[in-house]
Amino acid sequence: MKKILLVISLCFILTGCGNYAELDKLAIVTGVAIDKDGDDYEISYLVANSPKGQTSSKEGEAKTTVYSGTGETIPDAAMIIEQKSPKKIYLGHVNVVIISEEIAKDGFFKVADWLFRNPEARKQFYLLLAKDEKAKNIIKIISPLESFPSQSIATLLESNRDSKSASTTTTYNNFVGYVLEQGADPIVPTITIKGDVKEGSDQSNIETTEPTAYLALGPLAIFKEDKLVGYVKAKESELINLIQNKIKEIKYTLNYNDDDITIDSYNLKTKLSLKDEWHVNLNITGTGNIYNINSDIDISDPKEIEKIEKKWNKSLQKSLKKLIKKMQNEFKSDIFGFGNKIYSTYPQKWNQVKDEWNDKYFKQVKVTINSNLKIPDTGSLKDTLTEAKKWKK
């Protein structure tokens, strides 16, 4: 028995060595950028540098390299990179794909098929849109917090998704699924560069206490099927995530007695249902604490809290209705999936309207918003600071 275990162990060890030797011959791509260059396509690969054979990595040596190729088609551009790289290109570890605005406006499906048909590429990578910048430049920016720019982008996305409400994560599978689904359109997070691109791609960018250039997430990009139709503001991005039931927390500011009050809301839940074929109900529940208040208000008075709750619910309903109207009339993009709800509930009716859903019928949908938001706790202070000053006098 011991001999058998020894043989099995040796097999694993030898197999591992063999795999290591194979990996050393690969150029492992962790990020892909897709741009337009006139009528041609430009593909850029972010490749993780491996130690050179028989040598050790030099201190300060760049851990990544960007290879680019241009061609009339995506495969042509990719072939140019194959000819440049001394190692075999391997796409099995791609975790982010950045597309330019030109690619998005032209239609993502024109390049998506190349990714889908590549047998090595996983389909769970994050998809982002480079706003006001070439996609190629995005994957060049290095960060002091992550070894690879692609990992920095993925971490930025995930941390914003978990701790903030203005962004979201969209994978390749998510995007394609929305486009192919009946009555639903996708959204994609945007990313841009703050600072100088050249300085941000230099090793010195991570050797200072304050980087000269860094990546920042922007507003959500709205797509109609697979084409970019516009962007929304940060606050609108939060409301989109709220309608899609993707967030549990949000800071909401409203005007009350000519002053601003910020409410830290949590336990948010949105349920979408149909009242009839053309009538959608949005039911929103949640609780909140008064996060910031500068006015002379007695927040220990239950009646005052009731007034704030009423104002909060009305303000949120008004903001949501305005956003929905914008999607129906300006963008004509059903990112909320109202059509999908009709498709699953009234399939025969859907078959009659699906061909003109976005342009004609989506805007005819009536939306009723019912919100039941409560403030069970007024925060850690019994009185506002303004009220406390009055007592001091």
Image: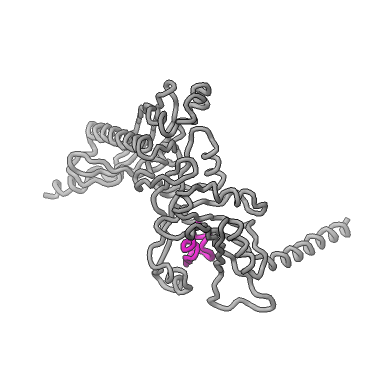
Q: How far across and down, in percent of the image, does residue 308 sit?
A: 25, 35
Q: Quadrant of residue 58?
A: bottom right
Left or right placement of residue 344 versus residue 302 in this view: right
Q: Is residue 301 left or right of residue 341?
A: left
Task: Give the total number of marks visible in the rendering.
Answer: 0
| Residue at point 53%, 58% (across, down) | 41
**Closer to the camera in the image, 105 or 214:** 105
* Residue 279, quarter of the rendered image: top left
Q: Is residue 108 above or below residue 303?
A: below
Q: Nearer the viewer, residue 344 or 107?
A: 107
Q: What residue sits 56% from the left and 60% below the top? A: 71
Q: Is residue 30 above or below residue 182?
A: below
Whether residue 136 appears in magenta in the rendering, the answer is: yes
> Which stretch is magenta?
135-154
Name the quarter where the N terminus is drawn.
bottom right
Q: Position of residue 299 (x, y in %)?
A: 23, 39
Question: At 43% from the left edge and 21% from the top edge, which residue is drawn?
Answer: 276
In the rendered image, residue 204, in percent from the top left (x then y), is placed at 45, 74
Instruction: State yes or no: residue 211 in magenta.
Output: no
Give the colour scheme of this rendering.
Answer: one colour
Q: Residue 52's image quarter?
A: bottom right
Residue 309, position in %: x, y? 28, 34
